[in-house]
Image: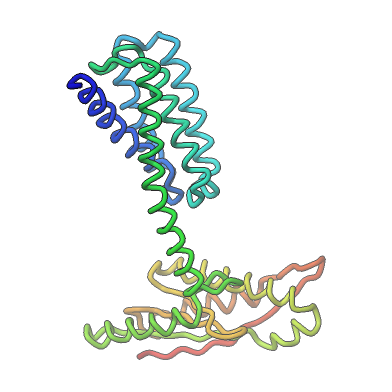
Amino acid sequence: MAGYAGSVNAILYHNIGLFILILALLDEDTSIWEYLIRCGLLINMWCQYYVNNFVQWGFIVSMVVLLVTLVLVRHYRTKIGPNFRYRLPIAVFLAADFWFTLPSRPAGMVVTPGIAAGAVLMFFLMKLSTGRQQRRFFQNLATEHLANYDELTSTKNFTAYQKDIFNHFGVARTGKQPLTVATLDIDHFKLVNDQYGHLAGNQVLAKVAQALKEIVHQYGAHYEVYRTGGEEFTVIFPNSTVKETFQIMAHCWQAIRTHEFDYDKQTIKVTISSGMTEL
């Protein structure tokens, strides 16, 4: 019994390390450099179990499978990341690749096919239990996103604007910091809908919002664009004066005015009007 308990404890210990490293790889929001570092840590751990066994077939096969899987995980990260149905089998597959190809005595352990199968089953149960928590986490994120973001333009919506402007105003008043708010409206947008159709109008709205976000974020990641009406957008510039943000609004005005929006082999041009106030 003591030997069995020791074996289970050893498997649990090694599975925890494997679990943490594999879990980190399935995060869709990592940059390429973060991902490469995490891959390096996993490969380093993997190699430690093959000291003096690097020429064995088990190491070669497991390493080839691991590297191919890592490339595929990175390529399809946006599909895998939030989807538990993909994350679970991929994680268990990597665990199986690890345990079933180990030499018979890695890192002071004795690994038989039965022990390897038990280790993979343990890993599966660990992933399954945490996966439910992750699924609830992603569901909460999705609910929060729907509540605060406009589905058409992917900008924050009026509800989020009301909360954020209240918070920014409090910070500005307490810290005696400037706060500038700008409103933008697409000129004669009803004519776009009447002439080209509502689908074309929706695409123009989405493209205008995308252009506004890209330009505004060039000047400051803390600046935020909101869709606060049908064709109306609002931009909050924390800790910035009207004088400091005038150039940003001029850039937005010029970019939209000169841009050609293509829809169904038609070219649509629009302009925007804007106003700014410093609170």
Count of labels shown? Answer: 0
User: What's the colour scheme?
Assistant: rainbow
| Above or below, 194 relative to 212 | below
| Quarter location, residue 160 | bottom left
| Quarter location, residue 221 | bottom left
| Above or below, 104 relative to 160 | above
Residue 133 point in image, percent of width and height = 38, 53
| Above or below, 110 relative to 157 | above
Residue 271 point in image, percent of width and height = 65, 82
Front one among 43 and 8: 8
Residue found at the far front of this picture: 1
* Picture residue at 46% right of the left edge, 89% below the top: 276
Left or right of 51 on screen, residue 81: right
Front one among 91 and 24: 91
Left or right of 265 on screen, residue 77: left
Front one among 209 and 134: 134
| Above or below, 136 relative to 268 | above
| Quarter location, residue 120 | top left
Front one among 259 and 13: 13
Residue 141 point in image, percent of width and height = 44, 63
* Picture residue at 32% right of the left edge, 86% below the top: 169
Quadrant of the snapshot with the N terminus: top left
Residue 234 point in image, percent of width and height = 49, 82
Residue found at the far left of this picture: 2
Quadrant of the snapshot with the C terminus: bottom left
Left or right of 206 on screen, residue 176: left
* Picture residue at 32% right of the left edge, 82% below the top: 167
